[in-house]
Image (cartoon, rainbow, N blue to C red):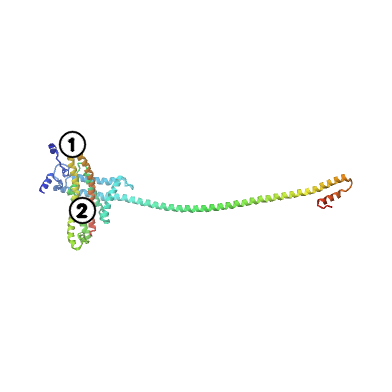
Amino acid sequence: MAAENQSLEIHPMDQFIVKPLFGDGPLMWYTLSNTTLWMFLAVLACAAFFMLGTIRRADIPGRGQMIVELAYGFVRNMVESVAGRDALRYFPVIMTVFMFIAFSNILGLIPASFTTTSHIAVTAAMAVTVFLSVTILGFAKNGLGFLGLFWISSAPMPLRPVLAVIEVMSYFVRPVSHSIRLAGNMMAGHAMIKVFAAFAGVLGVGAFVPIVAISAVYALELLVAFIQAYVFTILTCVYLRDALHPSH
Amino acid sequence: MAEASQAAEQAGIPQLDFSAFPNQIFWLIVFLVILFVIVRHLAIPRIETIRESRSRRIRNDLDGAERAAAEAGRLRSEIELSLAEAKAEAEAISAETRAKIRGSQDEAMEEVAGEIRRLSEASETRIRRIAESAGDSISEIATAAARDILSTLLPGGTSDGDIRQRVENRLRGDVN
């Protein structure tokens, strides 16, 4: 029992350490790191997905082309139905965000890989970019009318100032929840798998219990990988709708 | 609270290692831009071309189907028309043939009737002639018989002319 306790050294968070790819030098902003590698692989996988899928340009699609067209139609319909027809101008941006997150999440599930989207730095950068773009777009499109987003004209007059304060606060919380939701989901699942894996290493014959658990969690994580990409994207669409049509 | 942060420090949450932020954000921007260019200028135009070509093909096929349906309708009405024409023609031909057959039948019947009439007339003539000649023969035979009887009973009694006259009178029903 004591020996087992000694060998049970779990480092579930080590997988998230950002380190240089080559050598042990300091991590500068330009250093090639594991983040660089896995972002590159995600972009490569996306490009391969699109290009190989549509290589035949067939009127009657094969399996690969079917999936590419499905992804295209999925995001396009989401933009159109959530943010409106005039938001289709921004469809390429949203498609990029969706594909990047989806592929990063899924690549992160490969054992010994690195999940770039499990980092607050990455998700927050994206969320803040979305937040700033949408806010600027809102003012550019609607001028001060954009502030109508916070002035709920359907509420009774005395309540409106109170609601406006709440609305403003919730507006500024958006990038926080937007980014932490994605990073948190990615981090939690991966850490949990790592913990179970460490159990499996010390349990001997009993290891089948954590292995079954890992398999189950892995299946769940595949689902989460997709769902979180979807959630991030649809929230982006919702924010975009607010910027284009701020009237409540 | 302090315990928790201490634990976090021990576990070392790499996500909160701020020194790694510039690196991650820099590469994120680089790769997002690359991916955006790929999506915007390669993937989406390609997919849209495919979808356009497909919808064009579907439209063409639908148009073709519509044209074919119209053509089929036209052909059907044409067929119906020629069918009606052919039926009328057939009826005319059958009526004509029926009339012709009836005509030739009447002709043949008339011919046969004429023949029958002719034959019966000829027969009647012959019968009449036979009857007439039979009448002549009777008077001759009766005269010869009367002469023979008279010559046997009264030899050299009466003349031939007298006998003939009397026989003929008798035959005519003139009894003395």
Q: Which mark is residue A204?
A: 1
Query: Which quadrant does the N terminus of chain A fall into?
Result: top left
Q: Which residue is mark 2?
A: A130
The disc, 2 or 1, on the residue closer to the chain's N-terminal end is 2
Q: Residue A115 versus residue B142: which sits nearer the camera?
A: B142
Report the front residue among A238 and A144.
Answer: A238
- The residue type indicated by label 1 comes to Gly
The amino acid pointed to by label 2 is Val
Report x, y in % for residue A19: 16, 44
Instruction: Please tell me whether mark 1 sits on a helix, a strand or a loop.
Output: helix
Residue A165 placement (x, y as % from top left): 17, 59
Q: Is residue B36 visible?
A: no
Judging depth in this view, the residue of A155 and A122 nearest the camera is: A155
Tag 2–tag 1 contact (CB < 8 Å): no
Residue at (27% x, 54% y) in the render: A81
Q: Is residue B147 left or right of residue B60?
A: right
Binning the other alpha carbons within 10 Å of mark 2 as few (below 14), some (14 to 19) or many (20 upward) gives many
Q: Quadrant of residue A90?
A: bottom left
Q: Position of residue B156 (x, y in %)?
A: 89, 46
Give the letter of the chain under mark 1. A
Give the image location of residue B170, x and y in percent: 82, 51
